Image (cartoon, rainbow, N blue to C red):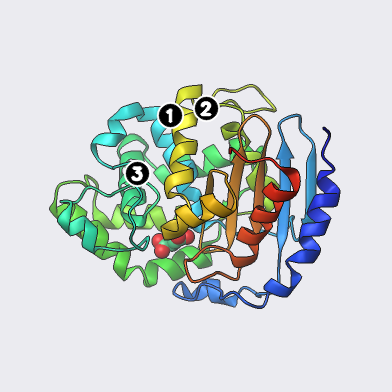
Amino acid sequence: MSINYQFILDTIGDEVQPLLSRGKVAAYIPQLSTVPLQQFGMAVYCLDGRVYTTGHAYEKFSLQSVTKLFALALAFAREGDAIWRRVGREPSGNPFNSLSQLEHERGIPRNPFINAGALVITDILAERYVQSDIALLQFVRTLAAEPALDFDRAVAASERETAHRNYAIAHLMKDFGNLHSAVDTVIDSYCRQCAITMTCVELAKAASFLAQHGTVPWNGKKILDASSAKRLNALMLTCGTYDAAGDFAYRVGLPAKSGVGGGIVAVVPGDLAVAVWSPGLDATGNSLAGTMALERFTTLTTRSIF
Ligand code: GLU
């Protein structure tokens, strides 16, 4: 059955309008609090190259934790299973920036998508590349076929100035011997990574290799083998949407990664990648309208992994 994606996206674009004033823009990174609330964009990138959009799908936004997906893909592609000696693969059941579990579990983060795990992944990349933030930016540029993608320096500086909790996490892991580079090096690189900006269209295209078993659909380049892509998608499903991953799986039924900038990218294996952005967050830190849009998308298209 052929699906009228454009009609479905337009329908969703209309349906979410009443939700746009309900969420809260992330304010703990001061620069993010300047983003106007009333925005919503969505883009579908099909594996055959068709692109469908609605709303502010060509507007740049701060990727924040969505970059953890690309950092993990790069580290996993380069280091393979060795990364699992330093970070786990279980949902944390705790807020993304929590310290308490890390103390009990002796500096080994539960998964690569909470901040502690992402800092370990950043450290792994810092050990391999002279400038790991640039290596990651290059990787994302290649995946999106967008050589002009960049960091937002004001957002990176704003996060760096207020990164007290991430510093605390990094120092705790350093004390347990699970951070090899200098804490400052890791935090600097992590803050720049989080400040990469992209549009929904670019993001959906960049993630499309995860829908095609690890191979970039438009140039055939293998980023991950099929087994590794499956594992990365499984981690997105179980850990990719903060402490709401269970509810997100229940409502949406897709592997996804969200960020406090209001972006969410999700994957329908064998079919497409879809990105949404709306800066108003719900209480769990996921985009309120973005989550609803993805829930409606899988309902209206009947495309999910279940
Ligand atoms: N840079 C943010 C932080 O570390 C990312 C948070 C997020 O998007 O989950 O707090």
In the foreground, 208 or 31:
208
Residue 21 falls left or right of residue 240: right
Q: Estimate how packed mark 2 is, as few (under 14), some (14 to 19) or many (20 or more) residues with alpha carbons within 10 Å.
A: many
Q: Is residue 304 above or below residue 259?
A: above
Q: Which residue is mark 3?
A: 121
Q: Estimate how packed mark 3 is, as few (under 14), some (14 to 19) or many (20 or more) residues with alpha carbons within 10 Å.
A: many
In the foreground, 183 or 235:
235
Q: Is the distance from the Cβ of mark 1 to the nearest ligand 1 atom less than 8 Å?
A: no
Contact flag, marks 3 and 2 (Cβ < 8 Å)? no
Residue plotted at (37% across, 60% down): 96
For the N terminus, which image quadrant? top right
Q: Which residue is mark 1?
A: 77
Contact flag, marks 1 and 2 (Cβ < 8 Å)? yes
Specify the amino acid type for callout 2: Ile
Contact flag, marks 3 and 1 (Cβ < 8 Å)? no
Which of the two discs, 3 and 2, labels the residue nearer the N terminus? 3
- Please state the horizontal and vertical placement of residue 131, each as a whole percent of the image: 40, 43
Specify the amino acid type for callout 3: Ile
- Please state the horizontal and vertical placement of residue 17, each as a whole percent of the image: 75, 70
Residue plotted at (65% across, 75% down): 37
Secondary structure found at label 3: helix
The CA span between labels 3 and 1 is 12 Å
Residue 269 falls left or right of residue 122: right
- Please state the horizontal and vertical placement of residue 154, each as a whole percent of the image: 52, 67
Q: Which residue is mark 2?
A: 223
